[in-house]
Image: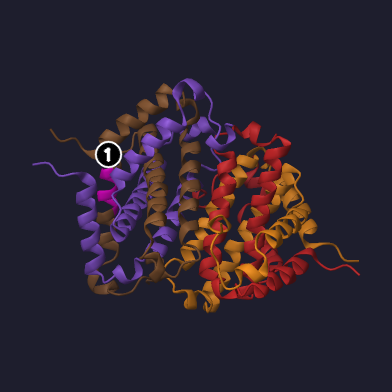
Chain colours: A purple, B brown, C orange, D red
């Protein structure tokens, strides 16, 4: 019987925090900071690389990047649990908004931000 | 027939990027920037709130926060696709590392960063 | 004969980059990433602290925070040099905008973001 | 009689906060978040640009980038005031550390992070 990976991670992360009495530190404010800190560590891996080089990491660096991404996912899941937000549902809603905002025939090959379209 | 939500999001996001010829912009370097930009938007929602208030958002703000979190998840999934990284596998590996690094009997109720333990 | 500290830092940082042939890496894109990475390191120092504790750092932590702030200033100066932006002038212009946007009689004791005022 | 620009900005920003009774919100924790949020807005301007294009912004975008950089400087100055940190002194100390850490004859034309040198 399959169980969704995000649900399983969420349950395990919650148990991890409770075993350590760490829920007291996991206010949404603090978790948003921890997530942003990890996002900062992620970009540090790419800041001096060309775009081409960023797509062709060596095994060691790729392993480090994977762990930074794991940290981001972990804090994102913790934050969603604390706020009672369904991450997957939110992602589908955001994708529907992006479908409407960026019709493919209009934006093909053009990455300007939405507000730059009149 | 169930399909894992992250796999389904990944497939849909890849199709979305391809329909717009946006893969050319989705270098790992660029995606890491987009993710960090969204993390910045997320913390802006919490920066002037007390920790208590951050746990009790009104419906409108909660909806906005959910969409910022969706953006982060979306870029995280896109980045994992471009780098060939299995996000869920990375998260389980990181959790195992955290289990070893923060034994519950040692760190209970204490949130100092690992490097601050001798 | 006094010289403005930002001008002096700018001249020394430019010489430092040139001696190492690092200007090639200092595109505005890359410098913005480096700056954001340092901002991420800065918030990591505060993420598990209460607001009160964040105002009363011990000497060691205060020294570490000072160096993170130095990194941010350094990248901000480098970026302004590469883009030909006068940082101090920009700050005065932004302060004038904030004066108009947040009249003190209207926002006293209230930290909501500007867009939340109708 | 000249006065250093950072000192002058600091005095004006402190007065601005006091007139609005905003010092209560300006804990170091909160200011670090605001700074990171602005760093996120900064990188959003560059995330889909090539490195070359990032060095050749049009006037409108350059003006927007200047204001994001102003925000970062403003929060950096506010944070230094709250923590009693001398930003310029910290920058000179960090530059001396970088001089020792990255001897020009060793790192010329090479941007790897310090920890990647053995």
Q: Position of residue B26 (x, y in %)?
A: 46, 31
Asked if residue B25 lies left or right of residue B85, the reply is right
Q: Quadrant of the N terminus of chain A?
A: top left
Asked if residue C18 lies left or right of residue C111, the reply is right
Region of the chain picked out in magenta, as a range: B88-94
Asked if residue A27 lies left or right of residue D112, the reply is left
Q: Position of residue B77 (x, y in %)?
A: 35, 39
Instruction: From the viewer's side, name the closer residue of D48 and C27.
Output: D48
Identify whether A25 is placed above or below A78.
below
Instruction: From the viewer's side, name the closer residue of D116 and C58.
Output: C58
Chain letter of the residue carrying label 1:
B
Image quarter of residue B23:
top left
Q: Could one spot residue A70 in this view of the protein?
A: yes
Q: Could one spot residue A59 in this view of the protein?
A: no
The number of callouts visible is 1
Q: Quadrant of the C terminus of chain A?
A: top right
Mark 1, residue position:
B6
């Amino acid at each position: 019987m399959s169980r969704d990976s995000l649900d399983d991670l969420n349950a395990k992360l919650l148990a991890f925090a409770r075993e350590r009495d760490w829920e007291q530190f996991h206010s949404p404010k603090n978790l948003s900071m921890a997530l942003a800190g990890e996002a900062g560590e992620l970009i540090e891996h790419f800041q001096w690389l060309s775009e081409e080089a960023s797509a062709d990491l060596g095994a060691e660096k790729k392993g480090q990047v994977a762990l930074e991404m794991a940290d981001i996912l972990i804090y994102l899941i913790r934050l969603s649990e604390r706020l009672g937000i369904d991450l997957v549902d939110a992602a589908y809603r955001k994708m529907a908004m992006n479908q409407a905002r960026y019709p493919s025939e209009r934006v093909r090959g053009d990455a300007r931000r939405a507000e730059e379209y009149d």
